[in-house]
Amino acid sequence: MNDTPAHIKQLQLKIWLSKPPMERLKQMMEDNTALYAFWTAAKQKGKNKPTTTSKSN
């Protein structure tokens, strides 16, 4: 997806790089953990979804 304007991306990068390395590492690890939990929950939800087959003759 490429809907973020370049000037906004530059501001985001400037803000990100202004943070101390340990804070950036901590944030990356928290985001990674949240993303992993989201995908695990989505996979579980997908497994519990009933499959419907409709046969009409």
Image (cartoon, helix red, strand yellow):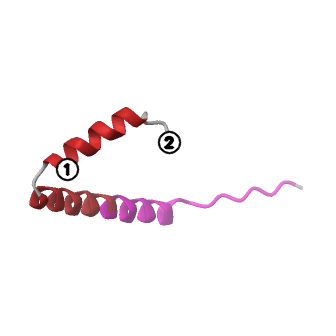
Q: For mark 1, does the 10 Å Cα neighbourhood hold few (<14), some (14 to 19), or many (20 or more) residues?
A: few
Residue at 51%, 45% (x, y): give it.
1
Task: Out of 13 and 34, give the one closest to the viewer.
Answer: 13
* Image point (17%, 62%), residue name: 25
Q: Which amino acid, by three-letter code, is at mark 2?
A: Asn
Position of the C terminus, as image quadrant, is bottom right
**Which mark, by number, is residue 2?**
2
User: Which residue shows up at 21% across the image and 63% down it?
Assistant: 29
Q: Is residue 9 left or right of residue 30?
A: right
Q: Is residue 26 magenta?
A: no
For disc 1, the marked residue is: 17
Does 7 sit left or right of 26 as displayed? Answer: right
Left or right of 46 in this view: 31:
left
Provide the secondary structure element on which disc 1 rests. helix
Magenta residues, dominant SS class: helix
Q: Which span is picked out in magenta?
A: 36-56
